[in-house]
Image (spheres, helix red, strand yellow):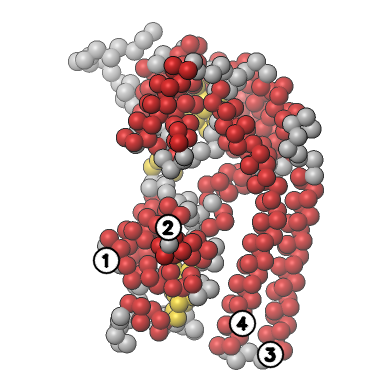
């Protein structure tokens, strides 16, 4: 029965207009998995190329266990085919990239060792011994990375007739993909999607920087889900690896459920309740309900991929946009000298000595540097709470001490993972 929304009605309850804030129960998930609509996002299908063979098989078995409740919006497959080869290439090169990054970390570690050894006048023989041990460890890790990468990807191919991912996806999705929108409806959806991007209305506005009408892609997926859910008049479980704020309601930096605007829109379009899960949580929730076994390590592997996507692992949980916002906020609050120090440190292999900091900031020699990093730490915490960086994002600027941490700082360092990102921003400023 349709819910009474008559103005002035006095028979409403705590959750009648606030269903997005109700925490789903096992009964709720059982209902949507057995009687609702389960729609995977394009990133769920694309991430199959990033999982181990075992994790990929378990996720596909989970989707298969949903049976006729599984339904894939046509736009999801548009995005899948548009991005498949790029994703495959990225995944194939991940081992080589990791090995290359590890070489960079090895060089940074050796520089740190050499700087420390010079400061404490360590004998050259002892320095050489430690350098040798350090290089041996990094060489072992690089070798393991390359070995694992070559073994995992030897059967993955661009040829769809021999690609094992396609071989498993094709039967899993047979008869479960929605039809494309008519040209008229597609054009209307693009117009609405772009309007939402401009007005910062969910979903999709976090993709504003995408070229052309690409920013409207999330709305196309959402519109197709709304239509199918309205046709079936059922609850919806949307499985997505997208953790941005234009899909999720965020509280203290954590995703607590779908955006209230989306739950309300689904209800007004004839659907039921909206549930959202990441692939990892989908496996954990669906396994006991649909009674299929999970092999040890599958959930952890899927979580690894989600963490890489969320943290932007190449830069310690930071993105170009987030770092630029940190710089902009610091400058607005008259802490532009911190930005200058961060950029200088990045240009100097990650470290700015105290004398350089005094020169950059035009400080008198008697001024203390205690508390110098506080504005950076405070704004970083704000960005974390806003969900613009991950919970595990690295510290941008850190005080360094020659001896006693309670004494005077010898300088400040930028985390090694952030150095290339800071330098990249500096290059953009100069161009």
Is 93 located above or below residue 5 in the figure?
below
Question: Badge 1 local density, few (<14 within 10 Å), some, or many (20+)?
Answer: few
Q: Position of residue 64 (x, y in %)?
A: 68, 23
Which numbered disc, 3 or 4, marks the residue that appears first in the sequence?
Answer: 4
Is 125 located above or below residue 6 in the figure?
below
Q: Which residue is mark 3?
A: 124
Number of numbered tags placed on the structure image: 4
The residue at 62%/67% (across/down) is 105
Which numbered disc, 1 or 3, marks the residue that appears first in the sequence?
Answer: 3
Q: Which residue is most to the left?
A: 8
Q: Helix, strand, or loop for circle 1?
A: loop
Q: 188 or 356, which is in the foreground?
A: 188
Q: Helix, strand, or loop for circle 4?
A: helix
Q: Helix, strand, or loop for circle 3?
A: helix
Q: Position of residue 108 (x, y in %)?
A: 60, 72
How far separated are the C-alphas under marks 1 and 2? Answer: 17 Å
Q: Are marks 2 and 3 in contact (CB under 8 Å)?
A: no
Which numbered disc, 2 or 3, marks the residue that appears first in the sequence?
Answer: 3
Q: Which residue is mark 2?
A: 323
Tell me which corner region of the image, top left, top right, bottom left or bottom right, holds residue 82.
Answer: top right
Residue 399 left/right relative to 92: left
Q: 300 or 315, which is in the foreground?
A: 315
Which numbered disc, 1 or 2, marks the residue that appears first in the sequence?
Answer: 2
The residue at 66%/56% (across/down) is 97
Label drawn at residue 274: none
Q: Which residue is mark 1?
A: 334
Tell me the quadrant of the picture where the C terminus can be found: bottom left
Label drawn at residue 114: 4
Q: Which residue is most to the front?
A: 431
The residue at 63%/89% (across/down) is 122
């Amino acid at each position: 029965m349709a819910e009474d929304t008559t103005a002035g009605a006095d028979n409403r309850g705590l959750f009648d207009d606030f269903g997005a804030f109700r925490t789903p129960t096992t009964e709720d998930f059982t209902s949507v998995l057995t009687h609702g609509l389960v729609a995977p996002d394009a990133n769920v299908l694309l991430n199959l190329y990033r999982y181990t063979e075992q994790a990929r098989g378990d996720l596909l078995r989970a989707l298969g266990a949903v049976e006729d409740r599984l339904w894939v919006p046509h736009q999801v497959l548009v995005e899948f085919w548009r991005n498949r080869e790029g994703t495959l290439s990225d995944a194939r090169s991940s081992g080589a990239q990791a090995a290359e990054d590890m070489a960079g970390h090895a060089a940074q570690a050796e520089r740190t060792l050499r700087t420390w050894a010079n400061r404490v006048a360590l004998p050259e023989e002892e320095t050489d011994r430690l350098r040798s041990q350090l290089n041996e460890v990094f060489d072992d890790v690089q070798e393991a990375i390359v070995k694992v990468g070559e073994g995992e990807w030897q059967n993955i191919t661009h040829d769809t007739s021999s690609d094992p991912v396609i071989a498993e996806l094709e039967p899993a999705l047979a008869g479960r993909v929605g039809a494309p929108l008519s040209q008229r409806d597609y054009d209307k959806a693009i117009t609405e999607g772009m309007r939402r991007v401009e007005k910062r209305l969910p979903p999709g506005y976090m993709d504003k920087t995408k070229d052309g009408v690409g920013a409207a892609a999330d709305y196309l997926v959402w519109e197709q889900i709304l239509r199918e859910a309205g046709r079936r008049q059922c609850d919806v479980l949307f499985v997505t690896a997208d953790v941005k704020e234009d899909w999720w309601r965020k509280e203290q930096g954590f995703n607590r459920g779908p955006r209230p605007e989306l739950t309300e829109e689904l209800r007004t379009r004839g659907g039921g309740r909206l549930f959202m899960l990441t692939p990892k949580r989908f496996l954990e929730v669906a396994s006991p309900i649909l009674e299929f076994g999970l092999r040890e390590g599958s959930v952890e592997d899927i979580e690894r991929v989600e963490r890489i996507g969320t943290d932007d692992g190449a830069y310690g949980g930071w993105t170009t946009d987030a770092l630029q916002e940190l710089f902009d906020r610091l400058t607005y609050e008259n802490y532009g000298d911190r930005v200058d120090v961060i950029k200088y440190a990045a240009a100097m292999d990650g470290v700015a000595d105290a004398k350089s900091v005094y020169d950059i900031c035009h400080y008198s020699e008697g001024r203390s540097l205690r508390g110098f990093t506080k504005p950076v730490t405070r704004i970083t915490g704000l960005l974390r709470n806003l969900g613009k960086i991950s919970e595990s994002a690295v510290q941008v600027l850190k005080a360094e001490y020659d001896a006693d941490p309670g004494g005077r700082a010898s300088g400040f360092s930028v985390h090694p993972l952030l150095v290339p990102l800071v330098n990249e921003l500096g290059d953009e400023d100069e161009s």
